[in-house]
Amino acid sequence: MPTLRPDTAPGPLPPTGAVDVPETLGYRVKNRVLGPPLDTDQLENERLGIPTGLAVFSSDCISSSAYATEEILRVLVPVVGLAAFSLVVPATGMMLVVLFFLILSYRQTIKEYPTAGGAYMVTRDNFGMVPALVAGVSLLIDYVLTVAVSASAGAAALASAFPAFAPWLLPLALFFIVLVAFGNLKGVRESGKVFSVPTYFFMVMMAVVIAVGLFKMITGGLHPQSIHQKGMIDAGSEGGGLFLGAGLVVFLHAFASGGSAMTGVEAISNGVTAFRKVEWKNARRALVLMGMTLGTAFLGLSVLSTRVHAVPYEDGTPTVISQIGKQVFGESMLGHTGFFMLQAATMLILVMATNTSFADFPRLASFAADDNFLPRQLRRRGHRLVFSNGILALAAVAAVLVVVTGASVARLIPLYAIGVFTSFTLSQAGMAKHHITRREPGWRWGLAVNGVGAVLSAVVDVIFAAAKFREGAWIVIVLIPVFVVVLVRLNRQYARDDALLERDAEAAVADPILRRHVVLVFVERLDRATARAIQYARALMADEMRAVHIAWDRTAADRLAREWVRLGLSRVPLEIVDCPDRRVPRGALEVVAAELSGGDTEVSVLLPHRNYRRFWHRFLHDNTADEIAEAVGRLEHANVTTVPFTMGSPGRVHAGAPR
Amino acid sequence: MPTLRPDTAPGPLPPTGAVDVPETLGYRVKNRVLGPPLDTDQLENERLGIPTGLAVFSSDCISSSAYATEEILRVLVPVVGLAAFSLVVPATGMMLVVLFFLILSYRQTIKEYPTAGGAYMVTRDNFGMVPALVAGVSLLIDYVLTVAVSASAGAAALASAFPAFAPWLLPLALFFIVLVAFGNLKGVRESGKVFSVPTYFFMVMMAVVIAVGLFKMITGGLHPQSIHQKGMIDAGSEGGGLFLGAGLVVFLHAFASGGSAMTGVEAISNGVTAFRKVEWKNARRALVLMGMTLGTAFLGLSVLSTRVHAVPYEDGTPTVISQIGKQVFGESMLGHTGFFMLQAATMLILVMATNTSFADFPRLASFAADDNFLPRQLRRRGHRLVFSNGILALAAVAAVLVVVTGASVARLIPLYAIGVFTSFTLSQAGMAKHHITRREPGWRWGLAVNGVGAVLSAVVDVIFAAAKFREGAWIVIVLIPVFVVVLVRLNRQYARDDALLERDAEAAVADPILRRHVVLVFVERLDRATARAIQYARALMADEMRAVHIAWDRTAADRLAREWVRLGLSRVPLEIVDCPDRRVPRGALEVVAAELSGGDTEVSVLLPHRNYRRFWHRFLHDNTADEIAEAVGRLEHANVTTVPFTMGSPGRVHAGAPR
């Protein structure tokens, strides 16, 4: 056992020696299910080139194209009917303008904050803690929503290919969440192999459907599907005869629903360090490619939807993208194959997209916990080096959301994207301030880009919040400040506790010991566990020692007293305390408190503990000892010791001279 | 504090002194909801005269008449149609013959076992443990069924008066169970006042409905209700043209369903001690009165049902008794009042009937736990002197049964009464053996009575089991032996544990102490809680003492080591143990195991514990200390001590000379 004397410097340490104590069942199960534990040293990231880097970080962002067009149509169709198909492309175009500026802005962020470019870090750096918390809370909320939306959309993609799954959207979405959470608990690395397949598969299928669709559209081979099938949302009758003002409101609402496509744009800026050198340059290129992919897919699908007359369904399936796929690929054998491949790719990338949140949420939560704004349990890396508690928390909250909304993307969308744009605004504004403060070469251009980015994000955020306010956005608007207040209070609590714990700590270490040390052995009956406790009690060589029995059953107490007399245990007097209300823990507490009342006394409370062989045997026996420990442990200077006796242990250890 | 030296005899003991430690929230809530705690001395029963004694003990038995006729008809009507009304009175008559012999038999039991006349006790006395367990398990099962059946029938009675309640049978039945369980946790005594009202109210209403009904029947004023309403069970078309053999089977099945009326006959024999002197004489008279009341009500209702053509409904409401009431009382204002009063009385006595089980089940369970056949937690009297754990267990199991069967009396009846008749058989056979063994004056008469009772009970029990086998009786027939086996194994486990614990215990008390005592203080960081633990560690004056830090985070470990050096804590060396897999509890276990490996060593493991002011603060902090305690406590001679430090405690205690 290596002992580090205070005068030696801490060097490399040998690991603890292996001992012959069996592992617990829980640990063996964990080892079997999750794989062997990983050592802290194994915490390394593989470095990614641009193609794999793009695959790893873009699934969240690119996958949004699978539902963004649909959510725009869901707003437009009921109000303006067929005119929706003339408005969906302009709404998409407006969104792409926003996307353009976001990409420009994040190119700046990547360069200036190549190690920790998350909104929380950038905002904390430039504006301090409270704005950073607003950004952090906004992101955490949107990570939860990303998981809920993507899992639900993935389920809808599957059910659009196989309508038999339509009634099982909720269990399917929950299954996806559990699956990805499990993979993350196992510590699936952000490895290129895993991610490249679905991401590039989706990109290829998107390219195919858009290319074939546009070709057919130009050559006149793409026809609208027959309108008014059962379950489609009803088209409004106004036709386009809306007043200008009302029309603008509807249009902005549609624009806001399409904004869900922008989530995930920040992912690359969070993971710059994962790229090969020069990191920020590679990350920037990946960012631009990601933006172009998203833009192409989103715009392409919106254009095709106008021709196909794809209309959202009340219950979410079949999806708009599947309607487009069906019309584009047609009824031929090859066409059917193409359709099913498109749905498979969509489902895969949506499930992958939840993974981005599972990587980012626990990491961000651990940053906040490092700063004492979230419970400290979130800092601890688990069995496989991942932040297990963060993963479990994210999965649980997302699952609740999915259950509450019945795995309906349409019901989740109004809550979505507001958090992301709040964090965009704060981090871009932070960048702008950064440029002003530092005035490094090229700062003017940077200021212009990030300034425009910040203003644009703020405007979009306000539009989103206003347009979707009544449908659920208000929940997010209320939750963000509430969580910030809770987090600040939590932080103050931690600070207070730490101050209390640290005040005079260094002096307290040298405190003289108390004058009197009393050992009390709480005895329920006379058996070997009790004998073991008495043996230990004598080893403590205190100033005073006695056994105490709290008599909740007079007959048993009398029997114990008689046994005590018979054995002539003169060295250990027995005190029997009447306990008419049968509250043994309270009785014990009162005995100990009386002992402590003089001050200047250290009481060791010894509780014989019987270790049973099988865990369920525990339930067959009283847990009075635990209750006593809990009650007595509230008193200062009442030190509760559990003296273990293992049932069926190999016999008594006889050794040492009697003292 | 009174100390009982081993050489003094145990005399009366003063109670523990009051100390200035606040009560826990849980206790304050319990005090508010259940009332102040009762002292063990307050465990006294009021003594009852015959009228109140009858009221207290007969609700279970008499209330059976509310559903027994209905369950007979439910068997007969679908098979023989209108001929059912010619068979219901004979089936009832046969049941009354059985009742007559049961009453005769229990008169014997009451005289011979005036203090503990339950089937478990009588059987244990005469046949030994395993038959006693069969009787005990049978009774426990039937107590559960009594609660489920009575609560469900009570709900049906309410819904028959107010059809709006018909969809709410299940929640109503659960509400009744919770209500009675709560009353029992509060410690409602078997007080005459509470019980007399519903019992006598029901008796009066029964007398009225039967008297008026028979009068109208004789004078020709009672007419059949119109047959074939919606929801009535379909009448069979055979009309009485069954073959003799098949007819006998149906008749015996009907008889078996009516047997549910016999449950509760044993209640008075369990509570003889509650009667005024001479107890057994008063109990006997009450028993005869109870039998006569049940017989009259049961027979009267069966006779009236034949005239009214009362037919059970599929979903249990309206009940047969309510159909009889409606026809007997008629449509006048007075008639309506009578009808509602009848339903109210029925509902009240049924709810009361569950109370009998709530008194008997926990008592019987505590007897079995005294004999080490059930978990020992069932022996402990709670806050209000009742066996709280038994009450909660009964309520939980009965609630599950009610949920599973959807509060349907018809579905519960096939499980019912088999357990009761098994225990009747065993206890009557036990009585017969008792007479043969003792040969006290009049033993021949007693032997005859109990012998006939035992044989009759056995025959009836076999008929019940066979007739209702496929509808659910098999469950009970399987469960009884399974539970008996489980209980016997549990008993052996306890015996083995006790043997292990008690072997050499007396010698072990005098064991010499071990040669070496090592104190290890597990340290996470340097704060006042750690300082407190070090102060206590020094007070133990062990042979060796050191602080141990399990380094799951190297940065924190280095910081701690530097602080230790800076403070020059020479008396307490710090050992830093590397822990690459971040499993702090396992690391601690290995350190302690290495220390113990030489044998002959007592290790005191000290864990600084921070007592936070509010209970939820606990969740904000790691529970690593608890995990260490759990892991290390599996090692023999590893004594885990929690050294408490209360956050915001009034400051350090400075006293005593440094040692």
Image (cartoon, coloured by chain):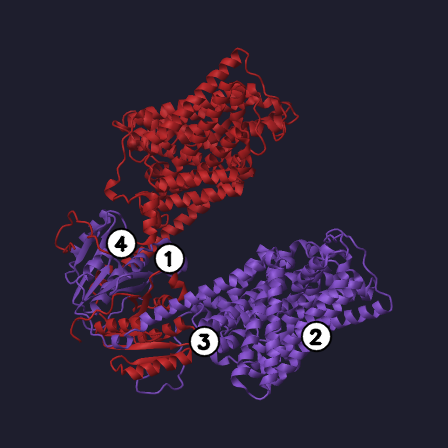
Chain colours: A red, B purple
- Give the amino acid type for the residue marked by disc 2 in the picture: Thr
Q: Nearer the viewer, residue B73 or B656?
A: B73
Residue where numbered disc 4 is placed:
B586
Image depth: mark 4 or mark 2 in front: 2
Question: Furthest residue to the left?
Answer: A7
Residue A392 place in picture, x, y as percent: 40, 45
Residue where numbered disc 1 is placed:
B618
Residue where numbered disc 2 is placed:
B293
The 10 Å Cα crowd at callout 2, few under 14, some 14 to 19, many 20 or more, is some
Task: From this view, report whether residue A521 is shown above or below residue B587.
Answer: below
Could you tell me which chain the residue with mark 4 belongs to? Answer: B
Residue A563 place in picture, x, y as percent: 32, 81
Q: Nearer the viewer, residue A651 or B123?
A: B123
Identify the secondary structure beneath mark 2: helix
Same chain for mark 4 and mark 1? The answer is yes
Identify the secondary structure beneath mark 3: loop
Image depth: mark 1 or mark 3 in front: 3
Task: From this view, report whether residue A270 is shown above or below residue A373.
Answer: above
Location of residue B210 (image quadrant): bottom right
Q: Nearer the viewer, residue A13 or A572?
A: A572
Alpha carbon distance from label 4 to label 1: 22 Å
Residue B19 place in picture, x, y as percent: 38, 75
Q: Is residue A17 left or right of residue B495?
A: left
- Give the amino acid type for the residue marked by disc 1 in the picture: Arg
Image depth: mark 4 or mark 1 in front: 4
Ranked by sequence position, the earlier of labels 4 and 2 is 2
Q: Is residue B51 left or right of residue A312?
A: right
